[in-house]
Amino acid sequence: MAQATIHFPRGFLWGTATAAHQVEGNNTNNNWWAWEQVDGHILNGHKSGLACDWWGGRWKDDLDRAAETGQNAHRFSIEWSRIQPTPDQWDESALERYRIMLRGMLERGLAPMLTLHHFSNPLWLEDQGGWENDDTPQKFATFVRKAVEALKEYVSYWVTINEPNVYAYAAYSEGQFPPGKRNINACFHVMTNMVRGHAMAYKIIHEIQPEARVGLSMNYRSLFPATASPLDKFVARTQSAIFNDLIPMAAKDGKLRFIFKTVSIPEAANTQDFLGVNYYSRDQVSFDLTRGAALFGRMRYPKDADLSGTGFIANEPDGFHEALKWGLKFNIPMVVTENGVEDHEDRMRPRYIAQHIQQMWRAVNYNWPVKGYFHWSLVDNFEWDRGWTQRFGLWGLDVETQARIRRSSVDLYADICKENGLSSEMVAKYCPEAMSKIFPD
């Protein structure tokens, strides 16, 4: 057996990621809580309920576990509807609770990365039209100013908006997220407003905290044509340009390039200090005339794909390397802000983690500017429209008792964090089936 260890640069960030609505519990004043109450919106009728009970204080034990297993950073989000429960009211006690949480991270040696918008909106904002309303970017900017003024002492890494591409498509094109619309024009309009909101937030953060590092977290989906057909190639290229490139390119040069038009947003140019890359899997794309809302492309996994338990994610580590190569075009540092797999039995996760870490090391070895990695997620959490059917946590969660369940991936990731690298010994111990792919003889 090959004996080897691959190492990462000194100061590399190793952490896990969470999001407010998914872990806090009882977020009763946002659009997702309302969405969950309507039959048919969430798989199996699941509800977030207590979630992981972070608002009740269980974040302390979970972050203890993160620190004890070698992590040195944590990415999380704050809930807009808690901080601004009505248009003309600020809840200082909510801000204080987030300050306590941030102090807790720092006391545990976890550098915070704070996300300001992660899919959920206050009910009052949703009632006013959400991100379709052209006043929302300014409302978001007002919230950002309040939050950053309150929390700046503890945070230097800020994510303005998490996966605006996913949010816009899922909420306004595919109808899976609230408000459940299926209108491609509304989808593009929401993207435009989110870019404007991001640009305002970027400038406000730097005004308050000049040394801050501010970026977007983008979901990169690797898309390749299913066949050599010109139509398959065209839809794969078009889908990738719209889903992957549209928003981060606007944050680079101030131009939002839709299929048949370009919207100029000059204030958005050069509003990323780093690019957050979220990567889970890749798809083959074929032309399908019935899929107009998806730009006439149908996405599938290859027939021989290494699939997660529910078939939701294919283990495609080469696509991760492609995602990091894609990120080079923006000429800024990169942070992997999410990467993981849903795997209740924890059978696939060890090889998924090891193979993806190895691909990230390849990128770092080429001197690509990757500065950190946040695994999704620390503990099983409420997975939006898929409810509790998907388990992404290193730690399992018993939703009824709130008990945490230690999975073997906890120990693999702990070894990686403590070593600041991945060794053949770790692979042999936790996922020997991946040895020939990671450390070939």
Image: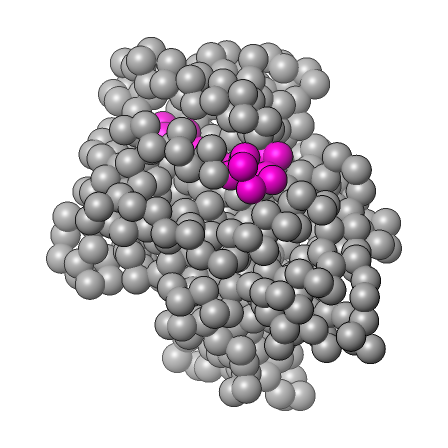
Apparent side of residue 41 relative to residue 7 in the rendered image (left or right): left
Quarter that holds the N terminus: bottom right
- Which stretch did the figure color magenta? 66-80
Q: Is residue 69 magenta?
A: yes
Rendered image quadrant of residue 354: bottom right
Q: Is residue 45 visible?
A: yes
Rendered image quadrant of residue 427: bottom right
Q: Position of residue 341 (x, y in %)?
A: 49, 61
For the residue pair 307 and 429, the one nearer the viewer reads as 429
Q: Is residue 363 magenta?
A: no
**Which residue is at a point 73% across and 59% down the rendered structure image?**
423
Apparent side of residue 366 relative to residue 318 in the rendered image (left or right): right
Name above or below for residue 96 compared with residue 434.
above
**Which residue is at a point 67% across and 57% down the rendered structure image?**
357
Apparent side of residue 280 relative to residue 373 in the rendered image (left or right): left
Q: Position of residue 339 (x, y in %)?
A: 56, 54
Quarter that holds the C terminus: bottom right
For the residue pair 213 and 299, the one nearer the viewer reads as 213
Q: Is residue 231 visible?
A: no
Apparent side of residue 43 relative to residue 405 in the rendered image (left or right): left
For the residue pair 366 and 290, the one nearer the viewer reads as 366
**Which residue is at a point 69% across and 73% down the rendered structure image?**
435
**Which residue is at a point 24% across and 49% down the rendered structure image?**
399
Q: Position of residue 268 (x, y in %)?
A: 63, 34
